[in-house]
Image (cartoon, helix red, strand yellow):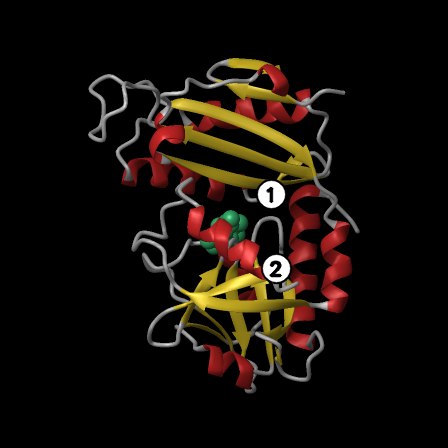
């Protein structure tokens, strides 16, 4: 079955799906996006994704292409057209097409594209048992990382540097030694006293939907939580570390730049949080491993 994309009001085979070459997304990365997990045919944490999408658009003064309710109807149509049971939905909006000039065009109509592809989340439950490795690199992004912008070149380069080093993820490290987040994930440690620590939801990081879900679950499970910056040294001195995102719900970090974290194997607190997360996934979607 050929994949189907939604582009500006139409569902089209992906091979025929096009946007204008003067679209500002192509010319300037002038746009925002969301990635939503789909399990058992249901969108996980949809209201949070829709709200963040709206906020990213507002922060950049891009006109919302449609209401949240309409967006969710189109999303469901895309999932149905692609017969997605377990997968990832991509939603992307740009300021639209206009003659190339930096200032906002007077009358641009926003471009809206949605695609979906299958993804087997059991890949992640397998990785949970082995854990993953991290490399670090200097933070080199702009100061508004809370906006889910499509300008992802530093993230792309960071992820490739991780792949080149046979690591799963790269963590961005600030000049003061603190870790902001990963190339496409939020970063966490579990201190030796059992407290979980993650960077505050400031303009310095993306406010991950999974981060929010996990914080709520940790509190529910009476796990102490601190939203505070931590350094690479703190992570290497921690009992455990882990990463979260929509497509990487909760994976233990076992090494950073080749140095072991804790005992160098996935730890019990991360495992407990991952269990809580999978239980939440099942509660929302009925999905089971
Ligand atoms: C830079 C960055 N941080 C964190 C995340 C995790 O966000 P979420 O949990 O909403 O997927 C992402 C996801 O793409 C990301 O790109």
Q: Considering depth in this image, is 216 or 49 the residue closer to the camera?
A: 49
Q: What residue is pinned by disc 1?
A: 44
Above or below 220: residue 28: above
Where residue 260 appears, as percent x and y from the top left, is 63, 81
* Residue 209 seen by the camera: no
Q: Nearer the viewer, mark 1 or mark 2?
A: 2
Q: Which residue is mark 2?
A: 164
* On screen, residue 67 above or below 139: above
Q: Quadrant of residue 125?
A: bottom right
Residue sitting farthest toward the front? 164
Q: Residue at x 47, y 52 (%)?
A: 155
Q: Nearer the viewer, residue 67 or 255?
A: 255
Relative vertical location of residue 108 with respect to residue 211 in this rendering, above or below: above
Residue 205 marker: none
> Gap in Å between the C-alphas at discs 1 and 2?
32 Å
Res 111 → quadrant: top left
């Amino acid at each position: 079955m050929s994949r189907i994309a939604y582009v500006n009001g139409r569902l089209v085979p992906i091979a025929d799906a096009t946007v204008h070459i003067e679209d500002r997304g192509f010319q300037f990365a002038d746009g925002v996006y969301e990635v939503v997990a789909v399990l058992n045919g249901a969108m996980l944490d949809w209201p949070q994704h829709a709200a963040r999408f709206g906020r990213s658009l507002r922060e950049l003064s891009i006109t919302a292409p449609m209401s949240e309710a309409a967006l969710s109807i189109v999303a469901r149509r895309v999932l149905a057209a692609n017969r997605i049971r377990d997968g990832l939905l991509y939603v992307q909006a740009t300021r639209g097409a206009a003659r190339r000039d930096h200032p906002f065009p007077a009358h641009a109509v926003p471009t809206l594209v949605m695609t979906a592809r299958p993804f087997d989340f059991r890949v992640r439950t397998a990785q949970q048992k082995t854990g993953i490795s991290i490399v670090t690199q200097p933070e080199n992004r702009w100061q508004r990382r809370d906006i889910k912008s499509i300008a992802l070149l530093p993230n792309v380069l960071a992820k490739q540097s991780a792949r080149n080093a046979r690591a799963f993820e790269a963590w961005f490290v600030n000049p003061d030694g603190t870790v902001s987040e990963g190339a496409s994930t939020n970063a966490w440690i579990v201190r030796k006293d059992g407290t979980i620590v993650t960077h505050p939801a400031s303009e310095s990081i993306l406010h991950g939907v999974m981060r929010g879900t996990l914080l709520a679950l940790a509190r529910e499970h009476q796990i102490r939580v601190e939203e505070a910056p931590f350094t690479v040294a703190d992570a290497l001195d921690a009992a455990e570390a882990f990463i979260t995102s929509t497509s990487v719900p909760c994976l233990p970090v076992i090494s950073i730049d080749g140095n072991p974290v804790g005992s160098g194997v996935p730890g019990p607190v991360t495992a407990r949080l991952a269990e809580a997360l999978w239980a939440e996934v099942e509660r929302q979607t009925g999905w089971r491993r």
